[in-house]
Amino acid sequence: MRFGSTAEAVRAWVEGWAVSRGAAQPTCEPWGFTVQVGLPGEVARHVLTAADEATVRKLAESSPAGVALKAFVAAGTLRAWLPPGWGLLDGHAVLMAATLAEAAAPPGLPDGYLLSSWSRGGVTRVVVRAADGSFAARGQTAVTGATAAVDQVETAPAHRRRGLGRVVLGTLAEAGTRQGARAAVLGATEEGRALYEALGWRVLAPLSAAMRTAETGPGAA
């Protein structure tokens, strides 16, 4: 299954991400979605399906510290639209999607590693451990409708370039398919993009994020 538009993929990503992170149900807005996250470092996030300078500035100027803005524009574009006191966040760089029927099957684990997988609260988690039981890699996915939102994919530095990322992604794809998903979405860093593209994922849009860096808005002294 391919998404009919980037906006459709964004909705699937937002809804799946909220389940994956245990956040509140996304609220639809004229410009996209608001998600109550409830964390000290990110109280909430505004996800702009179709961003423009006027909307970004209005949201930024009315948002207190701890509220992130996510927009599907290049980082330089978002930076130019931000008012004083705001800065770009590191992290996601692109929104990507894959058709699960076309996703590569997970390869076998390298010798000396053990994979565990479980599902709870609508989220399937995969963890790979080294021979001594220490953390090596992980990832998780939440299926909403016909889409699996892949999230929190990570490989420990000491265990990179051993194919563990492929194992995690392939296992998550199989889990999503079993739960009825026909497509998958994720927000990827540039570092992880090459791996995803090698596994059949395609880039849908740039993905940039920003947050207030100084107390210049609502609630400032």
Image (cartoon, rainbow, N blue to C red):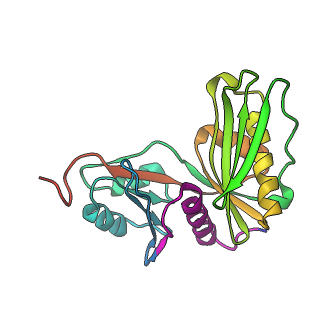
Rendering quarter of residue 34: bottom left
Residue depicted at x 65% and y 22%: 158
Q: Is residue 101 left or right of residue 181?
A: right
User: Which residues lie in the magenta part?
Assistant: 2-27
Residue 211 screen position, x and y as percent? 35, 51
Residue depicted at x 29% and y 62%: 63
Q: Nearer the viewer, residue 80 or 113?
A: 113
Question: Which quarter of the figure is the N terminus placed in?
Answer: bottom right
In this rendering, is residue 138 above or below 94? above
Q: Nearer the viewer, residue 183 or 7?
A: 183
Q: Is residue 215 left or right of residue 36?
A: left
In this rendering, is residue 63 above or below 131? below
Q: Is residue 45 left or right of residue 212?
A: right
Q: Nearer the viewer, residue 193 or 164?
A: 164
Residue 8 screen position, x and y as percent? 62, 72
In this rendering, is residue 25 above or below 101? below
Q: Main secondary structure of the magenta part?
A: helix
Magenta span has 25? yes
Rendering quarter of residue 162: top right
Residue 13 screen position, x and y as percent? 60, 62
